[in-house]
Amino acid sequence: MNIHNMINDMATTDMAGLYAKVRKYRIISFDVFDTLLRRDTPDPAGVFDLVGWKCGIPDFREMRQKAEQEARSKNPDKDVTLDDIYASLEVPQSLRDRLHRCEIDCEISVSTLNRDMIRFYRYCLEHATVILVTDMYLPGDVIRALLQKNQITGYQKLFVSNEYNATKYEGGLYDVVCREMNADPSEILHIGNAFRADFLVPGRKHIRAEKIATHACRTMKKYKDEVCTESGAGKTRQMPDASEGSDGAPVTGTADLRPDYGTEFSSTEKKRFLNAFLNNHTDGRNPYDAFGYEQFGPLLFGFVRWLMKKASEDGTEQLFFVARDGFIIRRAWKIVAGPCDIPDFYFEGSRRSFRVPSYTPEMSMEEIIDSVSLPIQTTVAQIFDGLGLDTDRYRRQIESHGFSPEMRLNRDELCADTAFCALFREVSDDIFANAAEEKKALEDYLAQFDFGKKTALVDIGWGGTMQKYLTKLLTSTGRDCRVNGYYIGLNERSVKILGEGHMKAEAYVFDMLNHPDDRFLIRPFYGLFETLFFEQAGSVKRYRRDGERTVAERYPYELDATKELQHQAEKIRRIQEGALRFCRDFQNCIYSDLAADDAMVMFSNLYQTGTDPTLSDAALFGDFKYFNGVTVSLAAPDSAAHYLRDPKKLRYDFYDSAWKTGFMKRLLKAGLPYRRIYDELLKLSPTASK
């Protein structure tokens, strides 16, 4: 960090110190920008980037800064106004007027409350006379509109440098304050962020001054500006150097502006804007709420914006949000899409409830086992559940072939295991009888929907199994099936599951069906990722009649089982509510479209935690339980000493972990490149995968 930034981020007291001083002074004076107000931009000149983006002028930042320099050189004896600056801008008058209006709109739009100061500001209103003092080229009326928008009211007077032709920086504005407030300098306490203008100069005028930090990291961790480049959407170029601005202006969208999209922003630039927004709006008091707001929320928002665009382009007539992962996605859709011409439904289905009815006697054992989504190290109980059979009812048959429900088996060796093949043959009639019964109930459930319309399934994704089974079942009953799929991600299995059947599907973050060079980006932390989408209800098992309707029968909700799991459910709820709060807040941001168009930007904070967790991250989620037929911890290793005594247990614990990079971080603790280590392990042994 350079000296300038160190001084910027210095504070002469803390909040407790400020509170203690208030009653000693008759007048409390506040700076405005970067003190009471923040900007949802990476730096003050970020406003100029947004004006250039909206008006289609790529180099507007440089043009605007040059015009301000020229205006100041032409008017050395006065503080310049925005009109002075635009008079020096070398563009046609009609464009100059448009840019002028756009800058003011952007300033109002991106201004936001400094949440760290507002409670103290209101305390000051109760115990002193409050005034505001700012060096600024914006007209006083515009600054008052900014303050009103952010509910900063109750102050007695606003002193703006360009209205008095005097500045804080040179000291003349403080003389004006003392004269107009009929105050001795010793009666005033001034609070601001600028080292010279808000601390040194008022001190020379015998006004007590306290400096607050210009930049404060309010997010739960420091997020990188760079984004993941492992998927096709993540190409970046370097962000140009941010230049210092005046006591200037911010951006966050209430202005009714439609962008021209004439200026390209790199992914890194977009990420800096997103991180600025997060830093200003997050409430980091609860770590799970903050995680939802800062990491899960951007992904949900970006996916829904992408979904809106895709559904409109494709002429989609109805959306089916698939249980359980689609529950929180649909809640985000209701917020972001608002009233929409496309009807949406909550479609209660699961891979299990659609896959089991598809089994027929014509299928080989290999085909059936291949269709079951099993981890590489599975158990007999997991396999039987995937086949649609209750393990407890078949315990005698299982044990007669030398197995137990808890016994671990290698998924890829099942069809070569003669004992398991014999067990499969013994129960195969029951598999197919149950499948036929479940198929009839599933058909009754589907008959309640109109699939004659152009339909899109919305789901978290990976292979597209649900879409495949739904399409297959509808086609087998002679229906005109027009089902598309919209997913957060499609992995390599989608090429076989969807591609070979020429089914249409697209994905937001990574799409290996349509872009083979993409990667399954959540593989090292799939358990953490999927946990974020948990509906507060059990997975769909099958279907049954309930009076005149056919309804979904659910498994018991996993997180209801114990007090500990109920606490986990509450933490997940806090994450989801934080994410939805972000969706509400970011909906009105002036650059929400700009950021959401780049999936890697919206995914990158979550990806950072998933692949490069801090010890705090790993501790926050590592003990969470993950359910995939069996219950495992996301990332809860034993001690290194224990594994030295029992290396085999390390192997099994690592296999079972549903957050591999988190497991390694908690075990080794050092700052190592865990994603790269995981990739190398994956090359050596595919069993390091899910």
Image (cartoon, rainbow, N blue to C red):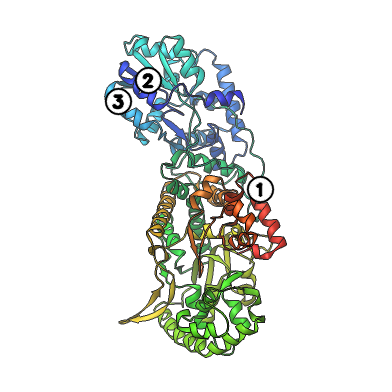
Residue carrying label 1:
673
Residue 323 spot, x, y in % from top left: 44, 68
Q: Height in image: 555 above or below 510?
A: below
Marks 2 and 3, Cα distance to the nearest angstrom?
A: 11 Å
Residue 29: assigned label = 2
| Near-viewer residue (98 or 356) | 356
Residue 255: assigned label = none
- Tell which circle, 3 or 1, labels the residue nearer the N-terminal end: 3
- Tell which circle, 2 or 1, labels the residue nearer the N-terminal end: 2
Q: How many C-alpha atoms fall within 10 Å of the one at disc 1: few (<14), some, or many (≥20)?
A: few
Q: Which amino acid does label 1 sit on?
A: Pro
Residue 481 in view, yes or no: no
Asked which secondary structure carries label 3, the reply is helix
Q: How many C-alpha atoms fall within 10 Å of the one at disc 3: few (<14), some, or many (≥20)?
A: some
Image quadrant where one finds the C terminus: bottom right
Asked which secondary structure carries label 2, the reply is strand
Q: Which amino acid does label 3 sit on?
A: Leu
Quadrant in the picture for residue 187: top left
Marks 2 and 1, Cα distance to the nearest angstrom?
A: 49 Å
Residue carrying label 3:
125
